[in-house]
Amino acid sequence: MENLTNIKGVIFDYGGTIDTNSRHWAEVLWSKYVEYGVPVEKAAFREAYVHGERSLARTPYVKPEHNFHDVLAIKTRLQMDYLLEHRLLTADLAEADAQAFARRIADACYQQVLDVLKVTRPVVECLSRHYRLVLVSNFYGNICTILKDFGLDSFFAEVIESSVVGVRKPDPAIYRLGVEAMGFAPEETLVVGDSFSKDVVPAKTVGCRVAWLKGEGWGNEEIDESLPDVVLTDLAQLPGVLGLNG
């Protein structure tokens, strides 16, 4: 694995990177649907997932004061509402039972993030002692609340959030804003993210170096593994790649 040199600052993605350590959130949620026995096919779940994400983009269900458990509760409720409305469940469920599933899934996913953060939070903390850190995230206007809830807020010098700045990944402009907030040249800035199309491609377009956190993605991306400077499978590998001992 190639060592990265001459890096002065690190831009982190959040969702799928820090909170799940390379798993796309659709896959995290689906694993809980399976675990709890929700009577639905994966194709129907994916349809409900996309509906929920589009609804969140159109309508400000998420408020700045909402933490991540609140976000998960909203997401799973929207998904269940869609599945019920479109009769996509493979067995009859009362609305109360469907929403009980939604609450259990939200609770379990929140706990899973807490477990993942036992691995990823020390990585962010380690890097914050050696580099200026900036967060660049597609989010709902409450990322600062989430960072505070998870004890991550003190590690980032700046936060660039899509709903605040008015530009979303994969538009390279959001990474240009990240580089401006960083204050270093793009080639001195390392971007760390899990999405090939939303992190790797736009970051390289801007001229940054990139560590791609390759994992369980959405499954609809064209991949060229020669594009990122480094490919990781676990965020815990990052300090070693950067030559850090702690």
Image (cartoon, rainbow, N blue to C red):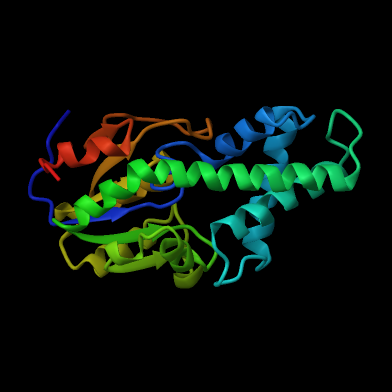
Total numbered badges shown on the rendered structure: 0
Q: Is 132 located above or below residue 208 in the figure? A: below
**Residue at the image point whose x is 74% and y is 52% from the top:** 78
Q: Where does the image place residue 61, in percent across and percent down from the top left?
A: 67, 66
The C terminus - image quarter: top left
For residue 62, side relative to residue 162 (left or right)? right
Q: Determine the image quadrant of residue 105.
A: top right
Q: Is 216 located above or below residue 111 in the figure? A: above
Please tell me which residue lies in front, 136 or 115. Answer: 115
Residue 109 in view: yes
For residue 120, side relative to residue 20 (left or right)? left
Q: Is 42 located above or below residue 85 in the figure? A: above
Specify the farthest residue to the left.
6
Q: Where does the image place residue 48, in percent across and percent down from the top left?
A: 72, 43
**Residue at the image point whose x is 12% and y is 43% from the top:** 244
Q: Where does the image place residue 81, in percent across and percent down from the top left?
A: 81, 49
Q: Determine the image quadrant of residue 33.
A: top right
Residue 193 in view: no
For residue 179, side relative to residue 6 (left or right)? right
Q: Where does the image place residue 209, in percent across and percent down from the top left?
A: 21, 46
Please tell me which residue lies in front, 173 or 67. Answer: 67
The N terminus - image quarter: top left
Please tell me which residue lies in front, 38 or 177. Answer: 38
